[in-house]
Each structure stands twice: as structure tokens, then as C-alpha cells.
Image (tube, rainbow, N blue to C red):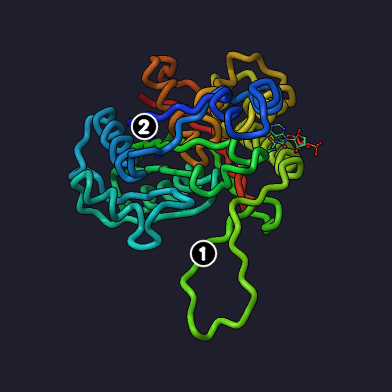
Amino acid sequence: MKIIGTGSAHPKCAVTNEMLEKFLDTSDEWITERTGIKERCVISSEKLEDMAALAANRALENAGLTAADIDFIICSNVVNEYVTPALSCIIQGMIGATCPTVDINAACAGFVFAMDMAEDKLKCNKAKNILIVCAEEPSRMVSWENRSTCVLFGDGAGAAVVTQGDDLKAIRLTTSSLTEVLYYQRHLEPTPYIDKPEEFEPLVMKGREVFKHAVTNSCRDIRKLLNETGLEATDIKYYVLHQANRRIIDSIRNFLGVEEERVPHNVERYGNISSAALPALLDELNRAGKLQKGDKLVFSAFGAGFTTAACVIEWGI
Ligand code: COA
């Protein structure tokens, strides 16, 4: 697998901490100190699929390909307006592709899970070019009356075009069924036969437990990958980490003992945009000209499930 193009798109409505102070018992000081987030872009008039298609088209353009060159689309998404059809089907039509598509849900770790699936398809020659689109609107999962959760999230999309190559050096995926620490139970239509209690509530999160799992598991994943590839922490140009919380990012950086420059972040501008965080940050680095051929990158993310996923990539373009 080799990444040959990246793209991203964010909603136009930027909600600052000061704007949240107007209707929540919170403060810019609390949010900044505990999370590092200063603002997040939240869907208002846009539809998620519009952002997904925009990110996808930008990635295609960056790769120098058209939708006709794509053999498979993998869309990572937790929630959107449609339960069916899959978001990937909607994106396929919007960008004018004709290939098969599938949606996956590995929560915030979805981008790396999608890369793993893509690698398998490319390796056995079932596809030459694959489009990965991560599109997320967690702002629609939280209660905007709950200061513990709504301040943390934003919406957005990130995309990457991958092709056959040898740039994926090692990858590691994990799932542990820790369903009670982070979940969102969807409302389903009633039937005349349902006689079990059903509760529908906005996103539930045990913040401290999630924090602990995130740091412990991400550090373990990265350490294992470095050992497996024989790389030192300082051989990695950038650690592209899940953008959930600046304190989590800093804890992982401290564990690795690397300088700040190696751990880029944009959580302060976008909040946690779930699986779109990694490809969106990668796209920023790519478009800023910060990636050189041969650079070693680590991607690492964690999410509800509990899922974790990490990989080592050698940048090849
Ligand atoms: N503004 C002001 N106060 C707030 C607040 C807010 N937005 N949100 C919570 N608080 C309050 C709590 O009510 C609590 O008050 P109390 O002591 O009177 O009960 C206090 O702040 C401390 O809450 P706590 O939850 O213990 O804070 P924390 O230091 O653990 O920070 C998180 C909370 C959510 C920022 C932190 O736990 C975290 O980042 N967890 C990981 C979340 C994550 O990454 N989720 C996504 C996974 S993909």
C-alpha cells in the first residue's frame, strides 16, 4: 500500500469556547486546560456527504486520478443521517465513481482499520486504487446540554487515495469489548411487539476511563510497532495521533520522549472529529509541504469499542 493523495473538508461554522460559555456552565479556561481545544467546526447548513465528497475529490485531485480510476471505496463513519444506504454509496454517486463500496465503523480508529482492509485488497490484486473517506458528525451524537461531552467534538471529513506499493511497514489493530465507557444508543422505530425496556440517550462517556485506555493502549501499540520495525522513536518524522485531547497527545509524546515538532496537532482548531482526524491532519501536513519521500510516519488512534489501531508508513510521494 502507498498513499498517493490526501484531502479534507471542514464545516464553515467554527464554534469557539467563548460561544459555548453563553449557553453552558463552562469556561474557555476549563476547556483549554483540560483538552487544549479552542474551537471546533460544527455542521450547520452542510450535509455530511457534501464534506465527504469534497474531501474525496481533493484527495483524487492530489493523487492525479479521477473517480474512474478508483476500484473500491471504503468509508469510515460512526453516524450520519442515513442508516441505509451506506454513506460510501452516496459518496460514490456524488464523485461519479462506479466501483463497489463499503462502510466500516471502528469509531475513531477507522482510518487505520480502513488502511488495513485496503492493504489486503491491494496485496491480492483485487484493486489497484482505493479511496478511503472518513466522514464524521459526532456533534449529532452528543447532548448540547452536557458540558462534559459536547465541548469535545467537531465534525469533518478526511480522505486518502491509496495504491499498490510497499509503504506500509507494520500495522496493529485491537478491539476490546469495553462497551460501557463510550457509547451512543440509536433510536429505532417502535413495533407492536417490542416488550423490552429501551433507552435512548445521547453519547455516554466515562471520560477518565477513556483517557486512561487511550494513553495506555496507544503507547503500547506504538512501542510494539517500533520494536517490530526496528525503529527508534526519533526515527519517526511525525506521529500522526488521534486528535481527541491535547493532554492525551502530550502524554503519548512524553512516553515516547520525542520533541514537540514530531507530534503535530490541530485539535485546538477542530476538536475531536473521530476517524476523520488522522486523514485531515495528514492532509494538512501534506499540503504544507512537510512530508518528504522516505519520511517515516506513525499513525495511531483509539475509539469507542474500545478500538485501537496504529501503523508505520514510509511516505512515498
Ligand atoms: N466545563 C467546566 N467543567 C466541566 C466541564 C466543562 N466543559 N466538563 C466537566 N466539567 C466538570 C465536571 O462536572 C467535574 O466537576 P465536579 O468535580 O464538580 O464533579 C470536573 O469538571 C472534573 O470532571 P472530570 O470528568 O473528572 O474531568 P477530567 O479532568 O477527567 O477531564 C475530560 C474531562 C473529558 C476532558 C477527560 O476525561 C478526557 O479528555 N477524557 C478522554 C475523552 C476522549 O478522548 N474521548 C473521545 C474518545 S475517541
Percent of width and height locating residue 106: 53, 51
Residue at the spot of label 1: 187
Tag 2, which secondary structure? strand
Quadrant where the image shows the C terminus: top left
Asked whether, in this view, residue 4 is left or right of residue 295, the answer is left
Tag 1, which secondary structure? loop
| 73 shown above or below 249 | below
N-terminal label among 2 and 1: 2
Instruction: Give neighbour class at mark 1: few <14, some 14-19, many 20+ (Cα, 10 Å).
Output: few
Residue 174 in sight in this render: no
Q: Nearer the viewer, mark 2 or mark 1?
A: 1
Q: Quadrant of residue 2?
A: top left
Percent of width and height locating residue 46: 33, 39
Residue visible at 45% across and 54% down?
Answer: 104
Q: Residue furthest bottom?
A: 193
Asked whether, in this view, residue 219 is left or right of residue 152, the answer is right
Quarter, ligand 1: top right
Asked whether, in this view, residue 120 is left or right of residue 206, the answer is left
Residue visible at 54% across and 44% down?
Answer: 108
Going by the numbered disc 2, the residue's amino acid type is Ala
Going by the numbered disc 1, the residue's amino acid type is His
Measure the C-alpha gap from mark 2 to mark 1. 28 Å
Q: Quadrant of residue 49?
A: top left
Residue at the spot of label 2: 9
From the viewer's side, name the closer residue of 168 and 118. Answer: 118
Q: Residue furthest front?
A: 22
Determine whether label 2 and label 1 are within 8 Å by CB.
no
Residue visible at 36% across and 19% down?
Answer: 287
Asked whether, in this view, residue 112 is left or right of residue 255, the answer is left
